[in-house]
Image (tube, rainbow, N blue to C red):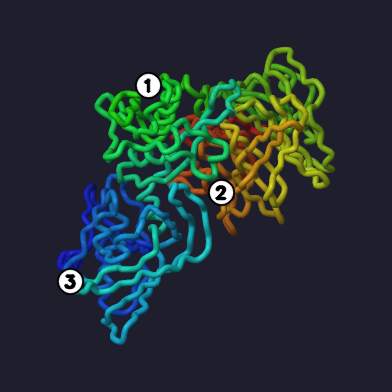
Amino acid sequence: MGADREKRGRGRSVRGRARPVRTTAYIGLGAVLLAGCASMPDSGDMRDVQSTPRQDTQVRVFALPPGEDARPQEIVQGFLEALTSDDRNYETARKYLTGNALKTWDPQASTMVLDEAPTPYTQVTGSQPDGTEYRYELTGDKVARVDEQHAYTPVGGEYRKTVHLTKVKDTQQWRIDELPQGVVLGRSDFERNYKSINKYYFTSAAQSGEPGTVADPVYVRSQVDPVTQVVRDLLKGPTRWLNWVARTSFPSGTALKKGTTTLTPDDQNKLVVPLNEKADRVSESRCEEMAAQLLFTLQDYMPTGVDEVELQGSTGAQLCELSEGQAGIIASHGYGKSAEYQYFIDGEHKLVRLPERDAVSTPTPVPGGLGEGEKQLRSAAVSRGEERAAGVSADGSELYVAPLTTGGTIGDPVLRSAGATVKDRLTTPSWDGRGDLWVADRDPKNPRLLVLADGMGEPLEVRTPGLDGRIEAVRVAADGVRAALIVEKDGERSLFIGRIERDADADGTTVSIVELRSVTQDLEDVSAMSWAGDSRLVVVGREHGGVQQTRYVQVDGSTLSGPAPSPLTGVEEIAASEDESQPLVAHSADGIVRLSPGSQWQTVVKEGTAPVYPG
């Protein structure tokens, strides 16, 4: 079979460690990967074949141009193979096109992700089977779409597109002259070819009043100069969903200086970024904010980050330079300092804590009324600075806020619920990065999502346009502009991410959570969740007809390709830190347990519920 491939002059070149793979095809709006000894039939319909297993990330795939006298099926196959290669601008793929297709095809328009390689079949146009036209129809089940901003959105439904071929008069060679815009891939090819990267923009959500940052995840081709891709995407500004609550310090229209093709840190781990004339007149302080955005973004992409960034104007003159250490002064970024403790409710219904990284497994009551007082609790939330906590009474009807200081008292409840049962009363509260406290009241007669400014203000009802169902859990990100909600409808619980918008006028402040989007479409019952990074959550749920599982998901609805947490029986609640190096903590059939990176679940105490990290 290898001789047949070589004889036809088609296929691809692979550089890197060799791995045996089975016959494969990913076909779509321009993407097929054929690995192993697979060949296209010379006549008849094209057949569906299996998806490619995930491949070694060190393998590089390079396409080969069309061979002489290649038949229509071979042209389709070679073109689609070329689209899964590591060509920077799909140069080889374009050699399979002719006419308007060559002039107008834009592979950057979108990437459609299908569950498996789409099923293709051939529709022949012409009086003879080897006539002057061929048309291939490609079908499959949609999973997601990556748009021109490289933002990922889960989608469903059937995919059905066509590719048309014709003979070029001058050469009598078959070429593609009609095809859809963009690219389509099977799920496993997408995971091999693309990587999720967080771009960072500014918010005003930090409790200290200084700018905070918010992650804006995008997907870039992992083997095709990702540093330059990420910088270009950052310069274009936030994606549409986040644009309403995030800002960039790069002036509108800022781009890389014309002629810049590749950005690479030097041997001192410094990255020089030449910009166009739009950035020439920025102030030094604004330039440093721009450099901070670049440093935060590149730190997310590169394991060692970038130590320093220098920005240059259109003439090549230096605008500013900023080191990694200085970037933290420009804006509060990520989770800030690591949590000192993990918290949960013990068997006596008091708020207790454990040192975060200590092997000690004997919890101690928190100082103040929530740990040392008489009030029994069913859940709690600790402020991100660990100086205050909010606790929900054992019957779920009252919410208290108290300082975590010795001798601190509880005082009167800041909120009451009139729900008839515990399940119809208050959820576990959540603190955001601004220091505001969020909680949902599940009273069927008056279901509400509420926010208390600084944890002490008058409860303000949050508007939730588009929400269909009752909120069972709320967790607000450290950035203060994104909220995760578990929503129950008709007995099923789903996880949604919404954007928090605040509007102030003469009548006061209005807070809304808008543009809710599902991030666990394949889970019919989500029972617990927690933020586990700047754009990542840990989720406990069940697929249709399946068993309970714990997994990581991105806020855009994509599933991370890394390993899931170790299996755990009977998980009721879970807590994660936004510092991804800290362990998971869960309430399971074995009590309070925790999972440190690289280890297995270990029991902390047999009696306890409602584990939380600050937030």
- State which quarter of the image contains the N terminus: bottom left
Q: Residues within 10 Å of mark 3 (few under 14, many from 20)?
A: few
Nearest the eye: 186 or 231:
231
| Nearest to N terminus: mark 2 or mark 3 | 3
Q: Please name the residue shown 39% across and 58% down the image.
A: 182
- Residue closest to the eye, 549 or 348: 549
Residue most toward the bottom? 127
x%, y% of residue 302?
Answer: 36, 34
Q: Between 602 and 141, which is closer to the camera in this rendering?
A: 141
Separation of residues labelled 2 and 3 (CA atoms): 50 Å
Which percent across, then down, holds residue 611?
Answer: 63, 32
Residue 289 appears in the figure: yes
In the rendered view, does 492 fall on the left or right side of 65? right
> In the rendered image of this protein, does residue 142 appear above or below residue 499?
below
Q: Quadrant of residue 42?
A: bottom left
Q: Considering the numbered disc 1 on the image, is that residue within a helix, a strand or a loop?
A: strand
Q: Which residue is mark 3?
A: 171
- Could one spot residue 609 in this view of the protein? no
Earlier in the chain: of badge 1 and badge 3, it is 3
The quarter of the rendered structure image containing the C terminus is top right
Q: How many marks?
A: 3
Instruction: Determine the residue positioned at 39% across, 30% down.
Output: 279
| Residue 177 left/right relative to 331 | left
Residue name at image x 69 percent, y 32 percent: 504
Label 1 sits on what residue type? Ser
Q: Which residue is mark 1?
A: 323
